[in-house]
Image (cartoon, grey):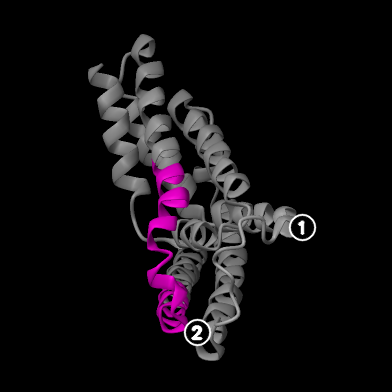
């Protein structure tokens, strides 16, 4: 149980932070659009990456300068464009959004999944978190106890994304006002651009080094 709690807390400290992935899940939850598909995509990504990190099989990506720089550049461009769209949405407004449309946006489920994959996998920091930090801590744990650590980390991931995605509905009364959407889109744009800037700086530093 000790190693389960350790995995739970370590993963929680990394995942419960304002970032591109969490911002996207929150918005999909508010819109009630493809939220289950988005949540499951996030969890599957965590399942694969965290498992690789704990089992010590994913260090090749995190140790490859070419791979991390390429991911940083592509991720920075993607997040810059996504952030630009968010700022535009904040400027124009989202008054036409229907928060009561339970089945709205079903036709764009593939797009939602692909966007989730891009936001998650094009950020090299996710590999550093899963392989270097989580994997590094798991490396100090006896082999027969690593499964408990892994289960704890994955439990955090599942609880967080389901709570964020479906718990967002509690905020719907607040988001019936267009002004609130403008604020959220502005925050999302700032988060995306902030991460894009850090990724670009990371790429320049790694390339220069």
Q: Residue at x 31, y 32 (%)?
A: 8
Q: In terms of secondary structure, where does tag 2 sit?
A: helix
**Residue 129 against residue 198 in the figure, above or below:** above
Q: Which residue is mark 2?
A: 90
Foreground residue among 72 and 78: 78
In the displayed structure image, the side of residue 156 where residue 75 appears, left or right: right
Q: Does 208 lie within the magenta span?
A: no
- The x, y position of residue 202, in whole percent, is 45, 65
Place residue 11 in its image quadrant: top left
**Residue 60 against residue 81 in the figure, above or below:** above
Q: Which residue is mark 1?
A: 107
- The x, y position of residue 123, in whole percent, is 52, 57
Helix, strand or loop for the magenta stretch, by majority:
helix
- The x, y position of residue 7, in whole percent, is 32, 29
Residue extent of the magenta highlight: 160-188
In the picture as drawn, the residue positioned furthest to the top comes out as: 144
In the picture as drawn, the residue positioned furthest to the bottom comes out as: 91
């Amino acid at each position: 149980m000790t190693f389960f709690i350790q995995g739970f807390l370590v993963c929680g400290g990394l995942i419960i932070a304002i970032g591109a992935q969490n911002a996207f899940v929150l918005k999909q939850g508010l819109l009630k659009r493809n939220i289950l598909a988005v949540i499951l995509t996030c969890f599957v990504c965590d399942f694969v990456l965290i498992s690789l990190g704990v089992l010590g099989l994913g260090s090749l990506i995190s140790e490859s300068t070419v791979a991390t720089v390429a991911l940083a550049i592509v991720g920075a461009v993607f997040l810059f464009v996504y952030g630009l769209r968010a700022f535009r949405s904040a400027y124009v407004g989202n008054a036409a959004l229907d928060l009561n449309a339970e089945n709205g946006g079903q036709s764009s489920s593939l797009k939602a999944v692909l966007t989730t994959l891009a936001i998650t996998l094009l950020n090299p920091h996710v590999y550093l978190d899963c392989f270097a930090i989580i994997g590094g801590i798991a490396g100090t744990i006896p082999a027969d106890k690593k499964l408990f650590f892994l289960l704890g980390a994955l439990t955090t991931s599942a609880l967080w994304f389901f709570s964020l995605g479906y718990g967002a509905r509690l905020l719907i009364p607040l988001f019936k006002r267009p002004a609130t959407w403008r604020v959220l889109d502005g925050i999302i744009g700032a988060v995306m651009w902030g991460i894009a800037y850090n990724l670009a700086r990371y790429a320049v530093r790694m390339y220069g080094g």
